[in-house]
Image (cartoon, rainbow, N blue to C red):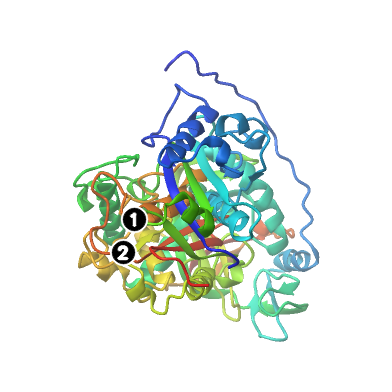
Amino acid sequence: MPGNVVRARVPITFSYKNRVGHALEQYINGLKEKKILGVKCPACKKVYVPPRTVCGKCHKPIDQMVEIGQEGVLKNFTTAHVTIANGEITDVQQPYIIGLIKLPGASSLISGIIKTSSVPEVKTGMKVKAVWKETTQGDYNDLAYFEPA
Amino acid sequence: MKRNVAIISVGYNGRFVSKRPDINIPELIQPAVDTAIGKTKLKHDQIEAYVVGNMHTFEGINQPHLWASDHFGGSKKPVMRVATGGSTGASVYQAAYYHVASGMYDVVMAIGWEKHDEGDAQVGLMGILLPEAFSLFNFGPDMSEDRGVAGLGGGGSTGGAAFQAMSYLTKAHAGIEHIDRVAAMMRSNAAKNPYAHLQQPGCTEADIAKTPIISYPLRYGHTCPTSCGAIAMILVSEEKAKKFGITDRVAWVKGLGSGASDATTGNIIEGQITDPAEQYMCKVVAKKVYSMAGIKDPRKDIQVAEVYSGFSHQDLMWPERLGLVDEGKSPEMLDKGAFAIDGELPLNPSGGVTSTNAIGASAMVRVGEAALQVMGLAEGGHQVQRKIENVVAHGWGGLFQFVTVTVLGRTPVKK
């Protein structure tokens, strides 16, 4: 390495206090009751999960909450080899599966950890169901993971 | 379009490489500027305005226009800096085009660069993604722990792209071997481009298949490198091109456009997740650009494509979304050799982004390479030999949801 390279390390902490907004607050409260909520556009009938306050397609405000089924189809997945906790990215001992799941009644996909007895068992198109934490507290983690249905 | 605009010169700083510890960022830019000017009879002071850009934060810097203007010749001249993520280079070029097409200026230089060895791209990505990702709370993606934003959990931008690759393969009934094959083709094309970074003459599917999986189905061999390099282009009005007497070896801008989509049209990280491989916006933008360029059938009228593929599955996906190939048919085109430099639709003769990626330059390199193909000036054996009328250049940026498309041609659109 030539001597004209200056190497500097500057520690930076990003910290956020993000407001989730009206629709997501209801979604998160729903998780506490082991329910998955979406919102239905009155014009195009699309059901957004998680819910939002406006339909991008129709440019209309939407607020009609609907409950979504908890057993759906795995539409897409990848393997993850790192995890992020408190802002730190660390390697995991074993790769895990992150899936995108189509739940009945939803027009969009939601992401979740897929747990199976073996990784090769995971296939696009397989049926999966939501598994909840025993004690829920109104947090994304209440919906613990999805397993084969 | 107000006025016809031609690209009259394209200059690189030299071969793109992973590290240039011998020079600083302005010193990387300057040779590209000098090369572009040196290929014409113009002098530096004839450049009336500059549009410049690099990827924000990847080099650990945010406002290059603060300190680089002397080196590219922009002091005391109008300078505009543009940054749109991966598509920055194309957006810079489009802004330069508007400068000339509007009638405000006659001779404008566009410059795009990246010096990846100065910063940490992953930290830069975090600096960009984190604020965006946190705002995504408003749309629902879970940022906590393992599920994180799926892209982060899966490993940076490869993690996000993995879902797109998976969706593409499923829809096209293709396999990971097709991604291996197209990746190998790009690295062998790069060997014919003296400016390309990863040059692997005769690279095979097996060579790529040996590389480890990063986020299934994407391997190390399917991902772009981080390169140091700069590109400069000179854009002039039709009147000035005639006055300068340079109307034969030029590339005319016939159509251009850009568009941003939300998740509802097929994205992964932003808003609602639907299908990251749908890329509806690319189809919309391409259609508009073709109509602007007077192209009725892109499959007949466009002879070469330079698409922006940070990940190799995109080399199969974009030609379809750009309307050059039927949906799901790229693997078949690849297998019959149609995408080769001497094939029916040469795809990235330059070796593409998976061979060379100086991010702020990359999307402009697609346009620059398209221009060189039209001019017949691509060096080192990657010039397409059959007659070229039109070339399409494409770029994507943002969170997989911002698209730019340009058509360059041998003759200007009639006014």
The one of B368 and B16 positioned closer to us in this rendering: B368
Disc 2 is placed on an element classified as: loop
Q: Residue at x 73, y 85 (%)?
A: A42
Label 2 CA crowd tier, 10 Å (few <14, some 14–19, many 20+): some
Instruction: Look at the image and tell me whether residue B286 can be seen.
Output: yes
Q: Residue at x 74, y 60 (%)?
A: A138
Estimate the spatial distance between the alpha carbons at disc 1 and disc 2, rounded to whole Å: 8 Å
Q: Which residue is mark 2?
A: B388
Give the quadrant of the N terminus of chain B.
bottom right
Tell me the quarter of the picture where residue B64 sits. Answer: top right
Q: Is residue B20 above or below residue B91?
A: above
Question: Would you say B298 lies left or right of A75 here?
Answer: left
Badge 2 sits on which subunit?
B
The one of B115 and B246 positioned closer to us in this rendering: B246
Q: Residue at x 68, y 32 (%)?
A: A12
Q: Which residue is mark 1?
A: B373
- Seen as rendered, the residue at the extreme top is A3
The answer to whether the residues at label 1 and label 2 have Cβ atoms under 8 Å apart is yes
